[in-house]
Amino acid sequence: MTVLGIETSCDETAAAIVHGRPPGPATILANIVASQIPDHAPFGGVVPEIAARRHLDLVEGVVARALSDAQTPIANIAAIAVTAGPGLIAGVTVGLLFAKGLAQATGKPLIALNHLEAHALTVRLTHAVPYPFLLLLVSGGHCQIVRVDGLGVYTRLGTTLDDAAGEAFDKTAKLLGLGFPGGPAIERAAQTGDPSRFVFPRPLADSHSLDFSFSGLKTNIRRLIESLPSFDEQTRRDIAAGAQAAIRDVLVRQTSRAMGQERERLGPKPHLVVAGGVAANAPIRDGLTRAAVSRGYECVIPPARLCTDNAAMVAWAGLERLRDGQISGLDVSPRARWPLDARYAHLKAAKS
Ligand code: KG4
Ligand code: ZN
């Protein structure tokens, strides 16, 4: 089966062609990501209106390039998979409308997908990880621990009470004047920083909860910067290193708790999967891998380019749903919020 994937939910306009079948692994025949970073950088964050206009400019060309890179005529595509949410609603709408038009023009089935599910299932595309597995999903908009029992069977065990981990990276970078996107900039600066010079709180240490809280970090950093008599380059790197260590420690601690709690349910060979843009961070990958190994888990993390937003993950999730016969109607609506765990669908405040 060969599926075209389209992704426009944030600031990457992406299209990919993936060939294979569940449980994977699969072959990525093309994976085009047109980043809008230069468009948003002057504003220090993604501007939804600009993102939607850029998706509109780029989506057709990106899809055409994916098809030509893969040397796959559209006639050979089994289905068109597209992110239908959660995300910036105008951007999601651009991708979904384009996919609907293509599906109608070609007669191919449309598969409207949850972006978080696409992140979650990437490890099946890369490593054929079997169900069930424990997932830490850490991106710019989401930070949650989920038990994945099968396609579409998700139990959320913990989530952020305020900011997502990627958001904490982005806000820290903004305070430090390190530019956008924050995660890679903080990781680079931290390489030559001393994480022990400034030690930031690691919230929720005493509770048994599997939730996260990151909003205190930016307040701490803002106060610290205001209190410093001078702010030199080394101080900037040391704060970056301290912030990254705090985020890493909280992720490792809460995920370790979850690994302990879920050990029995996951069978004799449990897997910890890490997905989302923050999983591109080397010290975080390293910390989680060590924690997993020490608890008898195998830790599987996709390569960095498949952790940040891309359409190969969308095409793969489409393949899984196609194999299951789950096709969408052409009347499917875009969704700004769309929790993976259906038990939370009624909560208006929750982003995911
Ligand atoms: O998954 P993603 O590309 O988009 C969302 O669905 O949100 O994640 C983007 C987030 C941003 O907050 C970005 O700063 C963070 O992932 N990120 C990183 C790194 N690369 C991207 N965070 C820490 N270290 C990185 N190397
Ligand atoms: Zn994402």
Image: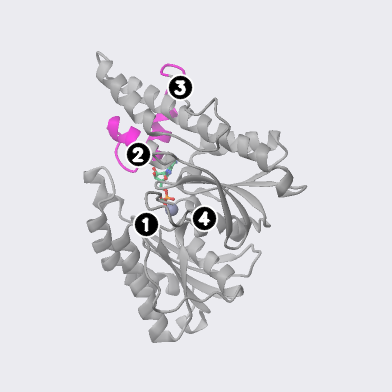
Crowd tier of the residue under label 2, counting other residues whose Cα lies within 10 Å: few below 14, some 14–19, many 20 or above: many
Q: Amino acid at mark 4?
A: Arg
Cα distance between the residues tagged 2 and 3: 18 Å
Q: Which residue ends up furthest to the right in the rendered image?
A: 268
Find out whether the residues at labels 1 and 3 contact each other: C-beta distance under 8 Å: no
Task: Give the CA separation, mark 2 to mark 1.
Answer: 17 Å
Cα–Cα span, label 4 and label 2? 29 Å
Q: Earlier in the sequence, mark 4 or mark 3?
A: 3
Which of disc 2 and disc 4 is earlier in sequence?
2
Location of residue 231 (image quadrant): top left
**Given the image, on which type of amino acid does mark 2 rest?**
Asp
Q: Which residue is mark 3?
A: 195
Q: Give the residue pinned by disc 1.
A: 87
Cβ of mark 1 under 8 A from ligand 1: yes
Helix, strand or loop at disc 2?
Answer: helix
Mark 2 residue CB less than 8 A from any atom of ligand 1:
yes
Q: Earlier in the sequence, mark 1 or mark 3?
A: 1
Please indicate whether residue 267 sits to the left or right of residue 204 in the image. Answer: right
Q: Which residue is mark 4?
A: 343
* Residue 98 percent location from the top left of the image: 34, 74
Determine the CA span between mark 4 and mark 3.
39 Å
Instruction: Give the residue pinned by disc 2.
Output: 170
Residue neighbourhood size for the residue with mark 4, other residues' Cα within 10 Å, grouped as few (<14), some (14–19), many (≥20)? few
Contact check, label 2 and label 3, Cβ < 8 Å: no
Residue 32 is situated, as x and y percent measured from the top left of the image, at: 42, 63
Q: Nearer the viewer, mark 2 or mark 1?
A: 1
In screen coordinates, is 169 left or right of 252? left
Residue that extends furthest to the front in the rendered view of this protein: 346
Amino acid carrying mark 1 in the image: Gly
Residue lying at 27% horizontally and 16% vertically, measured from the top left: 227
Task: Tell me the amino acid under the disc marked 3.
Answer: Pro
